[in-house]
Amino acid sequence: MTAEPDGPEGRLRRFATIWSRAVFPVTSTSLTRPEFEEQLLPLARSLSESLRARTFDAEAARAVGAALIDAHCTDPEALSRSLDCVDAYLVLYCGEDGHQEELRTRCSRLQHAMAAGFAQALRERTLGEQEAIAQAALRAQGVVAQALHASEARFRAVFEGAAIGIGIADLEGNVLQVNGAMLRMFGGSEQTMRGRNVREWTHADDAPQVWRLYEELVSGEREHYHVEKAFCRPDGTVLWTNLTVSLLRDADGRPQYQLALMEDTTERRLLNLRLRYEATHDALTGLPNRTLFFERLEKVLAAGEGQRFGLCYLDLDGFKTINDSLGHAAGDRLLVEVADRLQSCATAPGEMVARLGGDEFVALTTGPETRREVDELAARIMNALIAPVSVDGRELTVRGSIGIVEGAAGERSAAEVLRSADITMYRAKSAGGNRFELADPEADARAITRNGLTTALPTALERNEFFIEYQPLVHLGDGSVHGAEALVRWLHPQHGVLGPDRFIPLAEHTGLIVPLGRWVLEQSVRQAREWQERHGGNAVTGPLRVNVNLSPCQLTHPGLVQDTVDILEREGLEPEALCLEVTESALIGADDDLLKPLRRLAEMGVDIALDDFGTGYSNLANLRRLPVSILKLDRSFTQSMQQFPADPVDLKIVEGIVSLAHSLDLAVTVEGVETGAQAEQLRILGCDTAQGWYYARPGPPERLHELALVDATG
Amino acid sequence: MERPAWAPRSIDISVPSVARIYDYYLGGSHNFEADREAARKAMEFLPGLPKIMQANRAFMRRAVRYAADEGITQFLDIGSGIPTFGNVHEVAQAARPGARVVYVDHDPVAVAHSEAVLKGNADADVVAADLCKPQEILSSARVLDLIDLNRPVALLLVAILHFVEDADDPYGAVAELREALAPGSLLILTHASYEGIPLPPQRAEGAVDVYKDIRNPLIMRSRDEIARFFEGYDMVEPGLVSPPRWRPETAPEDEDPYAFSGFAGVGRTA
């Protein structure tokens, strides 16, 4: 709309410009001033028209006041400046040539109406905006509350559904809430848990720090703690838990609640106890095992001054024979019975019985008086073994050898104590068994431990520390030397000459028996060949023969037959000059697979002798089945014949065995002949061959020459 | 049981909100007494605060129009507060009918109010989210509905970054947003500063302390620090200047002296 500057339209525009300049600085509009002026122009026109209307009506000015609010002129200063402007310039620029007094009156009334319109619109806008923001706040609150509700519902679901027990209590210990898992752990209802106080949940097994940690937590000195804790269930059983307690603080950091998380470990604990029991007890006898015994012994040895200990180390005499002859099941039953009896010997506090393995047991006593007590303990044990043990209807006599060690705590290690006990036990066994011996430091120093020997065995063979002695076998009929039994010896660099009983079981255990046995066979066969070359044989009995012992381990070795054949061929000895001795116990229950190699050897002409006959529980009927040609009667049968007159029962037994043997076409050799009377008696009973000190002790191979020469010349 | 400590706090209108204080400065009544009390206290130190806000609004209006003239039809206004008048959607949709606008604010009351204002406007919406978590903004359903990130967007960060402390990594958030924008997008930004305030800084600090007291600290940054927000953008002429000097439509000399407080600028992604 263009206008002449001095025309009515131009004057109206000038009024609007003045108005906008006055008000613009107090508006909040983001419009520019010229834009704002454009907004005011229609308002100015409205005022101008009302001013000059034929019939005056101030109502339009109300709308102008309200329009100022719409243009964001909400500051009261905007109204004040607008009214100033209207008052000063409306009549001047828009009055044209009207009646001045009338115009001034109309202008005043227009201002009143403008002010009223402005006030009303501002009031409505203010109320409307207040309402809008209040509604917005309310809706926002609703949204947050909903989110909170959802979050609380989630946490409640976690709380209720958790597999872990969760409980919340106040700082006085009053239980406020527990979840289902915790109720199930305690086996109680919500009523029984709610209102309880945490402090009531003491248990005899509480670790000392449990309640100290609790006090620290509820007093705010500690944020959380973790313990293993037991609780009593309402039904009286024990609940074991992994318990974590945390302190919950409010928004300002003040302690508010305690939160307990618990995991039921009762089952796991039982399993652990069971595993621990199994790890520390012997499955067969239920006695503590080596592990537990060592733990206990170490604890005892670590005890303070004035504390002493006494230890009995028991090894059953001849248990191996029982095991071999009656089978392991019977052996096991015997061990169980022995274990029961031993346990009844050591019932006082501080006493303990354990099985170390095999037929080895230990009994331990502790306290200040063990010097006296350990002897009594050993005596009780010996006493307990007196009554025979009934196994499968058989009455088995049990004997044992005990090594006793007694001393003050803190002087020796557990291993040293046990070594001493082991040595002492062997001393008791060497002295004939069925006795106890007291450890003696000097004897210990001299003693040879099995362990030491076992480790020295392999190098001993390499270093040629073994040698063979020969004990002559004499023909009872004419007293001529018939041959000799090869007996292996170990010339130990520290311990001197050791007999086979000391190291053959160890060699069997480690498997060294196979190369050692082959070496012995080789040496013996070579020696027999040498005797034959030098000396020839006896006209009646043929050439000098050699007897070599075979251990059970060698018997099952697949190379036995081949090795034997090789050696005989290499040395050039006829098979008939070799006799292999096998113990009766090694053949007990032997099946055909085991007997096959022996049969092969027997077929080749090698003699097989059944050694130690009569010590096992041999089945005489079984003899037919075995490829043996000689029975070697154990020395126990002939011991009573050393005196005169001999025991008539023994005589009858020997006579019976000889007659049985001969009827099966077996020759009979007797061992342990020590007197002439004995030799004579045995000859009368029909025995074929004998060996023993009466004729000669085992000795170097040259000795046999001498005897044989005497023979030949005699 | 009492409310557990992990539950979110409820709306508390006795705690002043920067969005409602801003509304009060602009002569609005979308505020409560706590807001007005804080605003009056700040105005004791800086009586020209309303003029600063007004200059911000005027800049925003010019910048949105500039963006619309440049062909941009999508607007993302983060820290939109309580829309009283002269809002982005009004300006943008007046210039370009059908322009899409998404407002973002973390004040639940401001969001609820915006929802009411925008009811019936199919091309504008609001998201409750925090500038410090750009991914939450970019992946919100309403942003995905209205804004195509493969086309240029005008991102508005008007009078918001001075409420983000360095510890919350405002530069990282701005960079993350930039990464999401298509080439040709614009960043429209204003920021408070001691520079340009027609009062000694000691006086202005009084107003800063008010914001500290209401736990919404106002971080005054230097021009250089503010310029760093435009890393990766080419500055649109005349660069980073006081708000009235950015492409003025009337003589800047006519403006209130307070209007020159702080800085405003527009950048374009390459």
Image (cartoon, coloured by chain):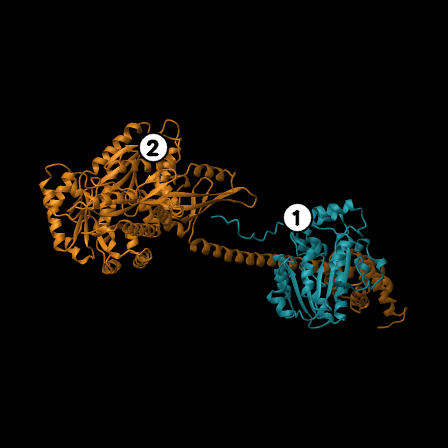
| Distance between the alpha carbons at the discs numbered 2 and 1 | 92 Å
Within 10 Å of disc 1 (Cα), the crowding (few <14, some 14-19, many 20+) is some
Q: Is residue A130 above or below residue A648?
A: below
Query: What is the x, y in percent for residue A620?
Result: 15, 53
**In this picture, residue A688 sits left or right of residue A115:** left
| Chain B: drawing colour | cyan
| Chain A: drawing colour | orange
- Residue A402, numbered circle: none
Taking the spot 66% from the left edge, 54% from the top edge, the residue there is B31
Q: Total label count? A: 2
Comparing marks 2 and 1, which lies closer to the viewer? 2
Query: What is the x, y in percent for residue A381?
Result: 24, 36
Label 1 amino acid? Answer: Ile
**In this picture, residue A345 sits left or right of residue B177:** left
The residue that label 2 is drawn on is A443
**In this picture, residue A240 sits left or right of residue A681:** right
Q: Is residue A109 visible?
A: no
The residue that label 1 is drawn on is B214
Q: Is residue A303 above or below residue A175?
A: above
Q: Chain of mark 1?
A: B
Q: Chain of mark 2?
A: A
- Quadrant of image for the N terminus of chain A: bottom right
Taking the spot 46% from the left edge, 36% from the top edge, the residue there is A212
Taking the spot 67% from the left edge, 67% from the top edge, the residue there is B101
SS assignment at label 1: loop
Q: Is residue A459 visible?
A: yes
SS assignment at label 2: helix
Label 2 amino acid? Answer: Ala
